[in-house]
Image (cartoon, rainbow, N blue to C red):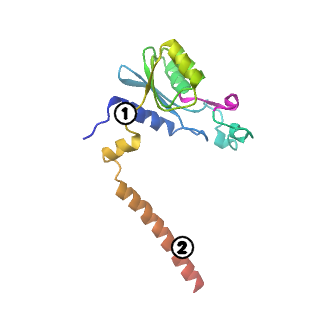
Amino acid sequence: MNRPDRSEYYMAIANLASLRSTCLSRHVGAVIVKNDNPISFGYNGPAKGVQHCDEIGGCIRRNMTDYASGKYLEMCPAAHAEQNAIAFAAKHGISTVGATIYVNTFPCKDCMNSIINSGIVKVVYDSMYDANLSKEIAEEAGIEIVKYEGKNIVELLLEAKFINPEELYKEYYDDLYEEEREKSLKRILKNK
């Protein structure tokens, strides 16, 4: 059996966490790992009890005429994945000093400051985010930054044979064709 290495395992967990995000722009997930144990998870979304963008009619930022990625962040009611993972650890009395955080998107400046102040010493990220100041802050604070180079979650699931692509597509197309056959039959019966 092909077993994912630890980096692949932790990045897969970060990607799974991102599935909980209700952000209409970007799904970000994070997992904090200490002594080779995941100790906290987070995804981008508003604080407990605060409505999500999809519940209030859409993203306030995206409705701005000159919207661009990273612009108008002060209008967003959500906390970022890294902030939520750090807050969860703090709420439950879990120390993040000396830990590593795995994130599917490079941290913004505010998240990098939270990472530094929480004692996390290493960031492993998958995709880049326009965050030059964040990189400079991390470098100055001595945070180790590592670009993830492992397999993505779909590759891991395919290798482990948890996903059979032929059956996945067959079921999809069988359902599609069955739906089309039913529509055709209804049209034929209606015209008789």
Instruction: Report crowding for label 1: few under 14, some 14 to 19, many 20 or more residues within 10 A (C-alpha).
Output: some
Label 2 secondary element: helix
**Residue at point 65%, 39% (across, down):** 53
In the image shown, does 180 or 133 lie closer to the viewer? 133
Q: Is residue 66 left or right of residue 165?
A: right
Residue on which the image places disc 2? 183
Note whether 26 is above or below 92 in the view shown.
below
Going 48% across and 35% down the picture, which residue do you hit?
Answer: 17
Question: In which quadrant will I find the C terminus?
Answer: bottom right
Q: Where's residue 49, x and y in %?
A: 63, 32
**Magenta segment boundaries in residue numbering:** 70-81
Quarter assignment of residue 59 = top right
Type of amino acid under label 1: Glu
Q: Number of marks in the image?
A: 2
The residue shown at (52%, 17%) is 138
User: Is 72 inside the magenta-drawn segment?
Assistant: yes
Say if the magenta span includes residue 172.
Answer: no
Mark 1 residue element: helix
Tell me, for residue 8, which label it has, or none: 1
- Residue type at tag 2: Lys
Q: Is residue 16 above or below residue 176?
A: above
* Front-lying residue, 184 or 71: 71
